[in-house]
Image (cartoon, rainbow, N blue to C red):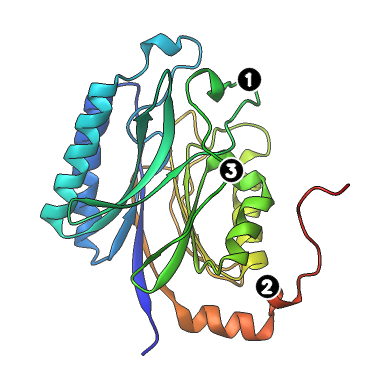
Amino acid sequence: MTASLVVSTVQMESTPDPEENLKKSLSMIGKAADTGAGLAIFPEYQMMVPDFQEPGRNSSSQMSARFFEAMASESARRNLAIIINYWEYGNKRPYNASVLLQGGKELYRYRKIHLYDAAGKKESSTFLAGEPEPRTHTFSGFRMGTAICYDIRFPELTQRYMRDGIDLLVVQAGWYGGEGKLDSWISILRTRAIETGCFVVAAAQCGPLFSGHSAVFDPYGRILAEAPDGEGVITAPVSHEVIDRYRITYPLAEQKRINCGKTG
């Protein structure tokens, strides 16, 4: 029997207030559960939109721990696997972290590798960068890899995932608005799907600061679901049947001849 999975992406407008964002996130889990999805994905900055100008005003380790525990508990209560984005505290600064939770337990964790020190923002003033050794994780028959926002501008990450047999790329984003940003968002997501032959499931922040437009792409680059500008939940099926058909036609992983590593 061919494996299939229904996935939901949560599009929300987070604020600088973690308590407000937690209440909204708990409500959004209920909306995602009502769709019948087996997996729901939250966007980057879910717990809090950072203040890059005054990093000292950002979240605390205690709040991060409480946010994590509340989301894990609600995931178990709703019997829904979720991928959250929260601030994982290390030594001096936190990591921008993505965590897969099921039944109240952590199954997989990814730390954002490429920090957004661009376009007048400086994420490295707030976060530590994750180690550039990403792992994959198999969930419900699909091998998944994660990218957080700025990560998707670096194709080496998804090429590494393709080498490891990825079927599903999960993207969490607080994709800031600006000139050409929405076009870039859609174009990059579509390209990552086509060049890896996997489904791309992208959850995004919305509101005046961000581009919104959470979306699900199949390996052919077709949009299966796309959110409008406001908050809400979109749902789409992903299937190995589509992946297998695409990869028979375009066996990219087997035909690739260029190593993306540095040369002499």
Task: Tell me the element at label 2.
Answer: helix
User: What secondary structure is found at the residue carrying circle 1?
Assistant: loop
Viewer-proximal residue among 262 and 35: 262
Residue under the point 58% across and 60% down: 161
Pointer 2 residue? 253
Relative horizontal placement of residue 74, taking residue 146 as reference (left or right): left
Mark 1 sits on what residue?
Answer: 120
> In which quadrant will I find the N terminus?
bottom left
Q: Crowding near pointer 3: few (<14 within 10 Å), some, many (20+)? A: few
Circle 3 residue: 132
Q: CA distance from mark 3 to mark 2?
A: 21 Å
Give the secondary structure at mark 3: loop
Q: Is residue 167 left or right of residue 13?
A: right
Horizontal and vertical percent for residue 5?
A: 35, 72
Residue 74 — which label? none
Q: Disc 3 or disc 2, which is closer to the eye?
A: 3
Position in image of residue 119 (x %, y %): 65, 25
Relative to 71, 214 lies left or right: right
Q: Residue furthest right?
A: 264
The type of residue carrying mark 1 is Gly
- The mark that comes first in sequence, 2 or 1, is 1
